[in-house]
């Protein structure tokens, strides 16, 4: 820094000295030349005043005056001239130019410094200013002109006075040199003094601060800053104090960062332990059974930005009864994780002990309250009887579930929640009972899912959850894929990068009713296969024989193909089969979007026309309805021993 500062000071000194030298030289030159010019002008006017142009003997007398002026060394050359277009015509002259034979009377002369502008002034009778120039033969000269006036102020001639300016030019050069030397000496002295002062009050403190900063950065000596003493009361003192305060803040920040790192590490360990504990408590797949289950159940746990203790569980109480649990423990930390595990265990053990649902929940509540009065469990516990479809549940501070009846629409289950488990020992829980039928679904979730907010601050449960479940795309999915669909929709709904964790659980009841059953079909061959399997199972459940099943299956297959012909390639249908036990009447109904066209009327091709005719001939009744959101076709067939012989009494109805 010192070298750069010295170079900058030298450059500034050079510029200032040059400017000062030029200004002083110009001032000196202007003043001296003004003085010489005034003297020359005065001499020319005196000589012009002594001339008498009207006296015939005036030329001899004027010549004597001119010679006397040269002899007295007041002028180097004196002449009386008359201006012409091409110069000055000399009438009389005396001085060095005459003596050296450069000029004589009668010659034409154009002084080098006079110029044609001054010549024009002379021709007009004006008096030009004195001029200075360097003559090629005689060196530096000064020329002054004064008019010789006649009677009436007419100009008869001009007196020209030339003075030798060689000595004056030498003095000007001497002044320039001496002034330059003086300025250089003064500049050098000032530079030395300035650098000494700057080095003491600026360079040295900055070097000390730089050395202290380097030592601090390298870790060699972090106490160097405390040894830096700056006595001046200026910006460097302020900078030094700021450095010291900055170091204090850095040390404090480092300490806080270390504490934060320790806390984050502890939180990471807790999160890992909690996740491992939660993962270990998640239910395993139900054991496979040859006859399968009358239900399908799946859960999904979505991790959040912090440690959360939302969970779900399901397990079999006996051969036919399924228990589902979904809940959450508020707070975060290892104690909450342990409490969650103990709560799950307490609920499971009480339910498996043979107690009723209400008694088991009351016992679990007392047990959890005794274990820890600081924590509570928000939970919903339900028991499904797979044989009857009866679903009993108790909501202890959990979110209200949603119920979809037979591929219809999801609606909130109207049942107020009770106090969370473990909050109050004296709680009497009431059981909510529902009757589930085939394809009924229930959706359970914890609070964090419903509290996900969008950009407008609206909750997901308030604005979007039910609408998401009721989308045809959602209802057509299996329960496992439906949970994933809700998770993805909730993630897109949220304006946050990461939301709190939550749990979801979906339950579908699948047991068929002998009198009424249904299934969901996709258009195409896979849908045909599912329809035939569904119809065969339903007819076998009602004790129909092989031929009756085969004839009805052919009729149903033809009807489904005709319905697919009126729908989009990716259309979905709902097939329902109802059997009247008293007279053996089978009612087959197919619902879906068919463009408002009766598939038996709008046939495409001869094969479709034959299929439509076959359906009419082998059914007692055909009804087509075009509703607002779907089309429905219903066929009725009598499956009795004499059904084939009664085809003549068939009735066909279309609406």
Image (cartoon, grey):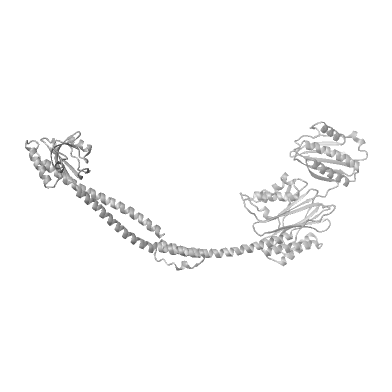
Q: Nearer the viewer, residue 520 or 372?
A: 520
From this viewpoint, is residue 489 visible?
A: yes
**How many circles with numbers are drawn on the protein?**
0
**Residue 230 image point, x, y percent:** 41, 66
Q: Is residue 234 above or below residue 391?
A: below
Q: Is residue 49 above or below residue 265?
A: above
Left or right: 183 as drawn, with respect to 238: left
Q: Quadrant of residue 343?
A: bottom right
Q: State the residue at coordinates (31%, 60%).
A: 189
**Residue 315 image point, x, y percent:** 78, 58
Looking at the figure, which quarter contains the N terminus?
bottom left
Q: Nearer the viewer, residue 171 or 613?
A: 171
Q: State the residue at coordinates (35%, 54%).
A: 12
Q: State the residue at coordinates (72%, 67%).
A: 371
Q: Nearer the viewer, residue 50 or 612?
A: 50
Q: Is residue 343 above or below residue 476?
A: below
**Residue 532 image point, x, y percent:** 84, 43
Q: Quadrant of residue 147?
A: top left
Left or right: 500 as drawn, with respect to 112: right
Q: Nearer the viewer, residue 172 or 298?
A: 172
From this viewpoint, is residue 395 visible?
A: no
Looking at the figure, which quarter contains the C terminus?
top right
């Amino acid at each position: 820094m010192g070298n750069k500062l010295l170079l900058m000071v030298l450059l500034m000194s050079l510029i200032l000295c040059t400017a000062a030298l030029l200004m002083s030289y110009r001032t000196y030159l202007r003043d001296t030349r003004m003085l010489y010019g005034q003297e020359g002008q005065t001499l020319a006017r005196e000589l012009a005043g002594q001339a008498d142009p009207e006296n015939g003997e005036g030329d001899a007398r004027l010549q004597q005056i001119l010679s006397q002026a040269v002899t007295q060394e007041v002028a180097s050359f004196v002449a009386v001239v008359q201006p012409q277009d091409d110069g000055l015509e000399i009438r009389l002259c005396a001085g060095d130019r005459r003596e050296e034979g450069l000029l004589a009377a009668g010659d034409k002369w154009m002084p080098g410094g006079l110029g044609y502008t001054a010549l024009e002034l002379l021709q007009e009778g004006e008096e030009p200013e004195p001029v200075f120039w360097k003559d090629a033969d005689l060196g530096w000269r000064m020329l002054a002109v004064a008019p010789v006036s006649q009677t009436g102020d007419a100009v008869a001639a001009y007196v020209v006075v030339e003075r030798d300016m060689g000595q004056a030019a030498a003095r000007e050069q001497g002044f320039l040199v001496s002034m330059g030397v003086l300025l250089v000496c003064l500049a050098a002295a000032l530079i030395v003094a300035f650098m000494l002062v700057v080095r003491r009050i600026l360079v040295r403190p900055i070097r000390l601060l730089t050395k202290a900063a380097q030592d601090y950065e390298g870790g060699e000596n972090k106490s160097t800053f405390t040894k830096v003493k700056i006595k001046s009361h200026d910006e460097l003192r302020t900078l030094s104090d700021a450095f010291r305060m900055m170091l204090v803040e850095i040390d404090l920040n480092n300490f806080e960062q270390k504490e934060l790192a320790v806390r984050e590490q502890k939180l990471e360990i807790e999160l890992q332990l909690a996740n491992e504990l939660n993962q270990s408590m998640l239910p395993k797949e139900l054991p496979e059974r040859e006859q399968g289950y009358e239900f399908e159940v799946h859960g999904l746990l979505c991790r959040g930005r912090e440690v959360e203790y939302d969970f779900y569980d399901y397990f079999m109480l006996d051969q036919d009864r399924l228990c589902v649990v979904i809940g959450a423990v508020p707070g975060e930390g290892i104690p909450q994780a342990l409490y969650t595990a103990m709560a799950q265990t307490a609920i499971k053990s009480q339910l498996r002990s043979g107690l009723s649902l209400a008694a088991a929940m009351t016992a679990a509540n007392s047990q959890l309250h005794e274990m820890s009065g600081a924590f509570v469990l928000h939970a919903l516990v339900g028991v499904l009887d797979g044989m009857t479809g009866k679903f009993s549940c108790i909501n202890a501070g959990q979110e209200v579930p949603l119920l979809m009846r037979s591929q219809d629409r999801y609606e909130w289950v109207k049942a107020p929640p009770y106090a969370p488990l473990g909050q109050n020992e004296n709680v009497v829980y009431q059981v909510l009972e529902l009757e589930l039928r085939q394809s009924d679904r229930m959706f359970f979730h914890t609070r964090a899912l419903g509290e996900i907010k969008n950009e407008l601050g609206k909750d997901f449960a308030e604005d979007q959850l039910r609408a998401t479940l009721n989308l045809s795309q959602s209802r057509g999915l299996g329960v496992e894929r439906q949970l994933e669909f809700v998770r993805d929709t909730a993630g897109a709904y949220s304006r946050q990068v990461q939301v709190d964790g939550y749990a979801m659980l979906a339950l579908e009841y699948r047991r068929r009713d002998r009198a009424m059953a249904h299934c969901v079909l996709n258009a195409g061959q896979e849908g045909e296969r599912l329809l035939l399997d569904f119809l065969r199972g339903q007819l076998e459940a009602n004790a129909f024989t092989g031929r009756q099943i085969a004839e009805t299956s052919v009729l149903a297959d033809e009807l489904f193909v005709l319905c697919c012909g009126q729908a989009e390639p990716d259309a979905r249908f709902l097939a329902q089969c109802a059997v009247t036990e008293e007279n053996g009447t089978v009612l087959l109904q197919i619902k879906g979007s068919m463009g408002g066209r009766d598939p038996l009327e709008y046939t495409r091709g001869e094969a479709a026309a034959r299929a439509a005719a076959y359906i009419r001939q082998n059914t007692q009744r055909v009804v087509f309805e075009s509703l607002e959101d779907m089309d429905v076709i219903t066929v009725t067939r009598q499956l009795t021993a004499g059904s084939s012989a009664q085809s003549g009494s068939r009735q066909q109805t279309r609406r």
